[in-house]
Amino acid sequence: MNAKKLSLLINAASGKCEADLVIKNCRVVNPITRTVKNADIAVEQGLIAGVGSYRGKTEIDAHGLFAVAGLIDAHVHIESSMCTPESFAQLVVPKGTTTVIADPHEIANVSGSEGIHFMINSARRVPLKVHFMIPSCVPATSFEDSGAILDSESVEELLKEPEILGLGELMNAPGVSSCDSEVLEKICAAKNAHKIIDGHAPGLNGFALNAYSAAGIKTDHECSSPQEVLERLENGMYVLLRQGSAAQNLAEILPSVTKENSRRCAMCTDDKHPQDIIESGHINANLKLAVKNGLDCFTAIAMATINAAECYGLNDVGLIAPGYSADIVLFNNLEDFEAEKVFIDGKLAAENGKAVFEIRNRVDKAVTHSVHIKPLIIEDLSIKLTSENAKVISLKNHELVTKCEIRKVNLTNGIFDCKENPQIQKLIVMERHKKTGKIGKGLIENYGIHGGAIATTIAHDSHNIISAGDNDNDIFVAINELNKMGGGIILVKDGTVIGSLSLPIAGLMSDRNFVEVSQTLKSLLELAWNELGISREIEPFMTLSFLSLPVIPEIKLTPRGLFDVNKFEFTQIEAD
């Protein structure tokens, strides 16, 4: 801004001249003063000039709607929407989201720096304000097989990009406490650049949590109990309350939030599928749920706006106040939080639930054709056991955390037989980036799949092929058909593909619009629940995709085998 433009802003703010835009007859919500004020909002050059009685060159009558600052998602993996940033913007802006803090570690694990730049370039073409965190753990641990590696030198270079706010969720908590040199170099690169560091520390407490926060890690979105929330707040961290598709922790941890400590709390979705956003909302869904569960609307709105802005050093968003960006959402009420109009930088971006901006959804060839597997034979899927007592990955509804349970299993000639163990299914994770042929094999319960298999290239965080099923033939068909398709999600029953979603961009995202993605995904969900018998308490695809992430307790599976997250070491399927 130059002096001439600044003088125009000042004159508009003082009422000496007409503002570019005036949104009249609003009920302006201020979460700091905890007030609702009947007033106009004057906008000049994309900034809020003032709140009061104003005249504008263009005037829009809000008819008494509640005006709230644009909502902020404090932590999201856009790839989990299976949409490009362009299509994602069309999906979330009509819900009132105007800013997101995105961690592109999904595509980075497949395509490295080229994947990150694809995300940045795509985001530049839409009004949604997308700020990025540089993935800190590519791969998530040294025990994984990702498609790319981002070392400390790469991280230091990427931190120079203008869209980069800091270092993404540091999942390698053991690497912090053990002073792993590469982990510390990445932390120092962010600290020396005066940028924030995100955390990811489920179950961490005591001295280990002290060490983690002492390293400079400022946020955590993995809290699943009120106690975990309070421990992190006591350590000076921000807690990001998450409500995604698979992980839905907000209601459970909300009792730990008070008017006094809420200023260190923000809202996030982390991972949310497009049909969930269409049907239930985005950050506005977090607001609705929080208020429904007893949180007052001012505290909830602060957590979805100014708190997130302050956490990430975004000094120009988060409030409807003079000098702030004119990111404004007009809600019908402060209970349902249905957005009627959404403005970004003073320009109408969405109205009546639809985006008013167009996209082209351009795709970079550098992030396609990413599935490369060694030829598979059905015998590769056999699980040979020397004991009838086996470790089983036990799933919990609406949780990413798993339990390691010891179950007695029936064997046929020393081989696990699904038919003889109807409550237990097979889990397969196959390396898909470099044709190494590595295959991890495990057992799961409470997933509930019967008479078929599901396979997907969405397998956090290294995104190899993960498949679950109750017979080897359907798993075999699913993996091979997924390879031919070039990545995505595939469902097989009785040896026949009954549904699929192609995800050609890194095996994670579609080049189609969010409506098509959502409709296809919705039909796949119905097939998973109705044809394959998976419980409706389980989100089949996202739940499956997290069973390969060896940083979320208690037990997971990688292409190298079964991994005990608590001990942070590989383990055998056979129980002692």
Image (cartoon, rainbow, N blue to C red):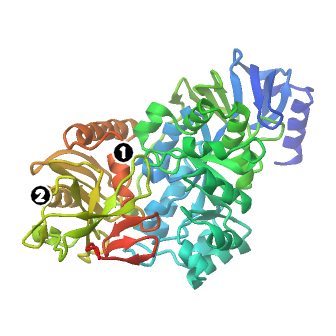
Find out whether the residues at labels 1 and 2 contact each other: C-beta distance under 8 Å.
no
* Circle 2 residue: 420
Where residue 41 appears, x then y in whole percent?
78, 27
Give the quarter of the figure containing the C terminus.
bottom left
Residue under the image location 26 percent in, 39 percent down: 529
Residue under the image location 23 percent in, 39 percent down: 527
Q: In which quarter of the image is residue 329?
A: top right
Is 16 or 253 nearer to us in this picture?
Answer: 253
Q: Which circle's residue, 1 or 2, is located before the other in the chain?
A: 2
Residue 163 seen in render: no
Is 25 or 357 nearer to us in this picture?
Answer: 25
Q: In which quarter of the image is residue 131?
A: bottom right
Instruction: Check disc 2: other Cα within 10 Å, few if <14, some if 14-19, many if 20+.
Output: few
- Mark 2, secondary structure of its residue: helix
What is the spatial separation of the Cα atoms under label 1 and label 2, in whole angstroms? 26 Å
From the viewer's perspective, is 203 left or right of 466?
A: right
Q: Which kind of residue does numbered mark 2 sit on?
A: Glu
Instruction: Check disc 1: other Cα within 10 Å, few if <14, some if 14-19, many if 20+.
Output: many
Residue 540 seen in render: yes
Residue 540 higher or lower than 562, as above or below: above
Is 174 or 473 nearer to us in this picture?
Answer: 174
Where residue 24 appears, x then y in whole percent?
76, 19
Residue under the image location 36 percent in, 45 percent down: 539
- Mark 1, secondary structure of its residue: loop
Where residue 295 appears, x then y in whole percent?
67, 35
Residue under the image location 11 percent in, 73 percent down: 414
Is 260 or 197 nearer to us in this picture?
Answer: 260
Q: Which kind of residue does numbered mark 1 sit on?
A: Glu
Q: Which mark is residue 539?
A: 1
Where residue 318 appears, x then y in whole percent?
73, 42
